[in-house]
Image (cartoon, coloured by chain):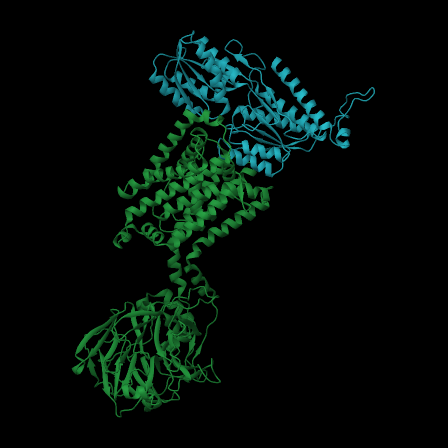
Amino acid sequence: VTALAHTPPLAASAAPRTTRTRALWSPRLFFADLLGKKWMESVVPSILCVVVGVVLALAVPHFATVPTFFSLSREYGEIALLAVAETIVLVSGGIDISVGSTFALANIFVLILLRLAGLSVAVAIPATLALGAVLGALNGLPIGYLSVSPLLTTLVTLIVYRGIVTLLDVRVGGTLARASFSDASWRLVGQGTVAGVPTSVGALAIVAVALHLFLSRSRFGWRLTAVGGDRRSARHAGIDVDRLRASAYVISGMLSALAGVLFAARLGSGSARTGEGLEFTVLTAVVVGGVSLLGGRGTIPRALIGTATVMMLSRGLLLLNAGSEVQQLILAAVLLAAVGFDIKFMKHRWSLIQKIYINPASIEYPPLPDFSGLWAPNERLRGAEPIGLDRIEGPEDVILDREGRVYAGTREGEIVRFGGEGFAKREVFARVGGRPLGLAFDEADDLVVCIGGMGLYAVTPDGAVRCLTDRTPRSLVRLIDDSRLRLADDCDVDRLDGSIYFSEATLRFEMETWILDCIEGRPNGRLVRYDPKTDRTETVLKDVVFPNGVCVSHDGQSVLFCRTWACDVQRLWIRGARKGTVEPFCPSLPGYPDNINKASGGRYWLALTGMRTPSFDLLMRMPRVRRRMMKRIPPHEWLYPNMNNGLVVLLSGEGEPLETYWDPTGEKHPNITSMREYDGWLYLGGLNNNRIGRIRMAEKGEIDPSRGRLETKGTSRASV
Amino acid sequence: MNRLGVSLSILGFVVSAAACRSGHGTANQEKAVPRASSGGELTADRFPKIEGKTIGFVPIGLGTPLTEEWLYRLQRGAERNHWAIATRDPNWDAQAQPAAVQTLIDQRVDALVVHNTDINLNAEALRRAEEAGIWTITVNMASSQLPSLHVGAEWGYGGGLQAQALVDVCGGQGKVALITGDASSQATLDLLKGGQKVFDANPKISIVATQAANWDRTRAHDIAATLLTQHADLCGFWVFWDQMAYGSALAVREAGRQGKVHVVTMDSTIGCQGVGEGLIDVTFSFHVPEQGDQVVDALAMFFQMGEQGVKPGQFRTAVWSEWTKITRDNVGQPGLCYTGKT
């Protein structure tokens, strides 16, 4: 990082007494979040749709009129149904170019049923839809079960169905054209309106809403999308790929037939030309709407938007009396552009997001303390007794129950318990999945656990796991969906009302990429409160720089929380006159604080997971340098905060550091993320350690003397 | 021209009947009807041209002499009468045609001239047009919704003429094949019906195939080529339009059976060309340029009638075109053929 050499040295006079963080609104950040949204994919098609509409309204006389709108909407109902049919198939990873022929065959079929066979509308329409299902199945069965190419199969049926239409037209076209048929309900389907809306549009609306819910909310829809996204993975996930693929064509056939019925009712023409080349229009429409030809990506609204764009375009060209060869050319150009954009956008979107996702902001630290006296390294942790040495991986937090057994979460997603003589007996207390982090016992002796990537869970004494909360009300102004808990980190139980305070370290990164939150250095986290009585979850403090350890104070009046990248501990008042206000508790630390827990004598234990260094402090002050670092060198060569030499700090009840406990060699406890005082011992946990450690304390103190029951039963339940 | 004369007098009768019917209306309408005044001369001043009208024209497809000729005649008439022509070309796309008609209704044109793909496709649109007070005229291809005026050839009669011509060139016996337009179009249906009577009267003529080529030259060529290989002793084709007939005739020539397999058809541009080149034996003209002029004249009358209180939908009329047989003998005669490019 050459830029470091050019920056002025950190002037002690300019350094703040407390950490200064900045949370400026960043357009890059906004853009990165925006690009990450799934609906972003349909923003461009929507804009295109509006632009096409506005341009045509301005440029083409008689375009933007109410009658044009209404007559267009009637046709729109039919074409959009075909587009929806095509979307279902495309999402499943196939393609159906026989929609136009199916449409035409359904059209002439329903006319024959009504005019020649003399069936009633109530019979003819379901019969035609059944025909559509059969026609679709003829596509779907070979494609789904015999793995015949969808393009080939539907090309064959395109020709065959068209051939049948021509045959029928030759055989019965004449009689059909002359046979009179008049039926009120048939007229209603073709020309009528239901509550002011053309019947076809109404039918479309019902089908579209149902299929949208079906595709986006149902198990079937999700699986269909999964099959389209990656057939092999879907198969490995146990999805019945063959059946799903086949059924997509059956749905497509039925929808095409429905469109054919509406067309028949509107125009009553059995012409063999019906629907010729329609597959092209429909494919253009869905691709313009943002449905991918490659499968797995597409929604019903996108199909509707694309259809609107293409239909407005062709109607505009018709009004301008551009010949249909010109229309075809323009549609082809639009299709080409849309496919090109789709491929380019999908190819570059994620790499673009990756490039701009991390948006460093400045953090300015107070000067590092003198590492003599209080902060002078000592060897107090060197003699720590190991518990579960090499039998546990990454005990982020440790806690003890009434019987003095030690609990800790592991990297494998388990909560293990050590008990018996010398803690030799290891048992898996619960399998929770995710990454168990902060632990706390509540009044009912349930183990409350923060699970990275999952949320806040509770484990009953007999090991049954249940979810307490995994979501909060979504904030209205954030682009990122913050309703789901991404990285619940540490929790503590408020003894006075039983509610649980917990931290969510960051909303922008995941368990595996948490360290990148430091490179960004923005207040991405929050403090959340869960009330088991009402089952409500609320954010009590938002925009916090990596809130990590959480501890309800001894008197229950405030919540202490560590801000890891800000290197301080803050206090949020939850009761009393200052309720809701935040103030510094321990404003200037030489390292990155992790968990904070109660200590005996009204004091607190604080774990520093790593120590600050002058170089990295400087880097944190200079976001632009960090940005250049990210751009120019690969991630494994970036500068990261030092995370491999921690210590434990004893804080007074007012946040004054009193004592420090070091393991300067880093052999046994290279990083310390948690510690727990219990019955004269201090237990140590570390995110990357291969053991739990414990050291005997000089004096045996009591935690929470105000609560007599806890006093006798043990200190374990006091805090996390 | 006899038929035309009769038709026009029928039209005149209907118009006056309609005028009489509406004569019971308000005083205003009475006033609007010009009456012969004492010694009044029939001058243009007394019947001013109704200018500023917009006429919507929707053919099945432009770019073929038939429809281009109509458009040309319409444009000439529009120029003369200071009207505007709004053309919408669905270019043989069945679905686009009702949409095209609808756009013109939405645009509130004063009259619609429609060449229907089939008899049902535009029926609803034409009904709505009439409801919206738009004069409707169909040319050659009728719709099940009757217009104010239909201008066109009488297909049943013409079918008989063509079938008879085919029987004649085949010498009253042999195998013949029919290549038709869209099976559901009114022209195809009526031509077949008219032809059938002739074939019924000539039992020695056997129809070996009836195939729809949907007015398309290439498709007709391919059908003809196939039929020629199937039937070595084919005597003739009756092809329902000269565009298709030319394609079929080319197939005959390619098969080296020119002179043995005869081609009979109708319309007088490419048909004339085919006759001139010896590819086609007989073609029948139905006087397309005149049809265009008749439409223009009718429009002028309709607009005047509108001024006199007559509304679209109050009467139904038809004008039938003349049929003229064209063979090698008379193909050079001036006025028989048209170019569609004038």
Side of A133 where B285 appears, left or right = right
Q: Nearer the viewer, residue A168 or B274?
A: A168
Q: Does B99 appear above or below A576?
A: above
Q: Nearer the viewer, residue B115 or A137?
A: A137
Q: Position of residue B313 (x, y in %)?
A: 63, 29
Q: Toward which corner of the image does residue B100 lie, by quadrant?
A: top right
> Which residue occupies the extreme bottom position in the image?
A699
> Which residue occupies the extreme right position in the image?
B38
Q: Nearer the viewer, residue A452 or A204?
A: A204
| Residue depicted at x 48% and y 66% | A477
Q: Is residue A568 visible?
A: yes
Q: Toward which corner of the image does residue A516 lie, by quadrant?
A: bottom left
Q: Does B9 appear above or below A671?
A: above
Q: Which corner quadrant holds the N terminus of chain A?
A: bottom left
Q: Position of residue A187 (x, y in %)?
A: 52, 37
Q: Does A349 appear above or below A314?
A: below
Chain with cyan colouring: B
Q: What color is chain A drawn in?
A: green
| Residue depicted at x 50% and y 10% | B328
Q: Which corner quadrant holds the C terminus of chain A?
A: bottom left
Q: Position of residue A713 (x, y in %)?
A: 27, 86
